[in-house]
Amino acid sequence: MGKALIIGAGGVSNVVVHKCCQNPDVFEEICIASRTKSKCDAMKEKLDGGKTKITTAQVDADNTVDVVNLINSFKPDIVINVALPYQDLTIMDACLETGAHYLDTANYEPPDIPKFEYKWQWAYKERFRKAGLTAILGSGFDPGVTGVFSAYAMKHYFDEINYIDIVDANAGDHGYPFATNFNPEINIREITANGRYWEEGQWIETPPLAEKKVYDLPQIGEKDIYLLYHEELESLAQNIKGLRRIRFWMTFSQKYITHLNVLENVGMTSIEPILFEGKLIQPLQFLKAVLPDPSSLGSRTKGKTNIGCIFQGKKDGKPVTYYVYNVCVHEEAYAEVGSQAISYTTGVPAMIGAKLLLEGKWKKPGVFNVEEFDPDPFMEELNKQGLPWHEDFNPVLLD
């Protein structure tokens, strides 16, 4: 049915590649491309011999001309961007120039400003519409599945949704004193930024990790959850009818928080370059180099994740509550694709979004967040592709 160019060769890319190969009727051919071609070759070697034809390529995703040349050479129907969020715009530019559809899992973030928002990518709406191309933004889990969960709740159970709490919990243990489950640079920039949530039409900021609650999550129990800003809040605040407040919560252990506080206090989480032995280096980039590579955590990580959305709203004038969530087991994800659940829960939805686009179910000209499409085929695919979801109509609510 189609050809996909997958840019990036980390843990998420590994999952996307595996899942594309599990759906060869849709993904007849894929090309895995990265700055380090040997990583792409290693993935190809694992999966070669199946129905999906796999090729590899070297590409500098910071360079639009380089991406354009690769697209013109491979001629994909869609580019699946699982590289760094700093590279979203160069890849979108390349897609526009070459006539390829686009999908990513995280919104653009300028390298020198720890701020992620959709304004840069939303600015491409008219250009993609005029070109007759589809760009799907944030087709990971959060953002991604959380947006689909919201659209599904809106479509089936509510006339209006007034409150959404997104809760992302990882109860996995990798055995290291301190490590991040995805790119340390992106992860630590996200966590050390101010918390922010949307209420009654305005954004309210909180100091980093200042808001804490305890929540009893299905299958993993009571966990400390902290309020963070997360990019799907920005799009959902615009796209969900009747919304009065939306917040995002993530679990962290006390051990993790202690390590992070120490690193921050000594300046290791800073993105301001310092002069060291005659060279300017970012402390955070140095820290990334000494921390364990997230892609190496898979074989060590035991336990489960639970990510979901708690909704409060109205149907036919009556109050309704609804909680929809997925539980993913680290060991099962690793046994299937060789990556832990954090990569799995991002990579599977990226493949699903691309699959729905190639099948024509999520295909319309312009730039869209996932909640702007019909959620039903995506929800169906989650159950088929390894991320089954569960419902609860009487959840414990967060005040």
Image (spheres, rainbow, N blue to C red):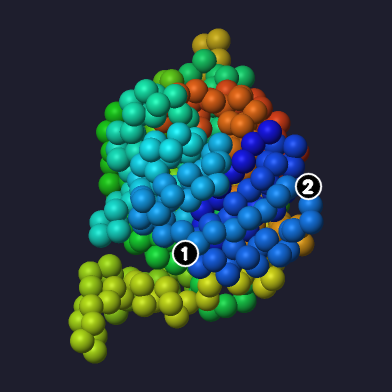
The answer to whether residue 282 is above or below residue 117 is below
Residues under numbered marks 1 and 2 in contact, where contact means CB atoms less than 8 Å apart: no
Amino acid type of the residue that numbered disc 2 sits on in the rendered structure: Lys
Tell me, yes or no, if residue 186 can be seen here.
yes
- Residue at the disc numbered 2: 51
- Residue at the disc numbered 1: 35
Place residue 236 in its image quadrant: top left
Amino acid type of the residue that numbered disc 1 sits on in the rendered structure: Arg
Q: Quadrant of the N terminus?
A: top right
Question: What x and y, as percent, mark residue 352?
Answer: 63, 39
Pick the residue in front: 87 or 165.
Answer: 87
Q: Residue furthest bottom?
A: 277
Q: Counting residues from the N terminus, which is met first, the one under dot 1 or under dot 2?
A: 1
**Is the residue marked by circle 1 packed among few (<14), some (14-19), or many (20+) residues within 10 Å?**
some
Give SS at disc 1. Answer: loop
Q: Quadrant of the C terminus?
A: top left
Q: Residue, x 45% and y 80% (percent of image)?
A: 290
Tell me, yes or no, if residue 208 can be seen here.
no
Place residue 238 in its image quadrant: top left
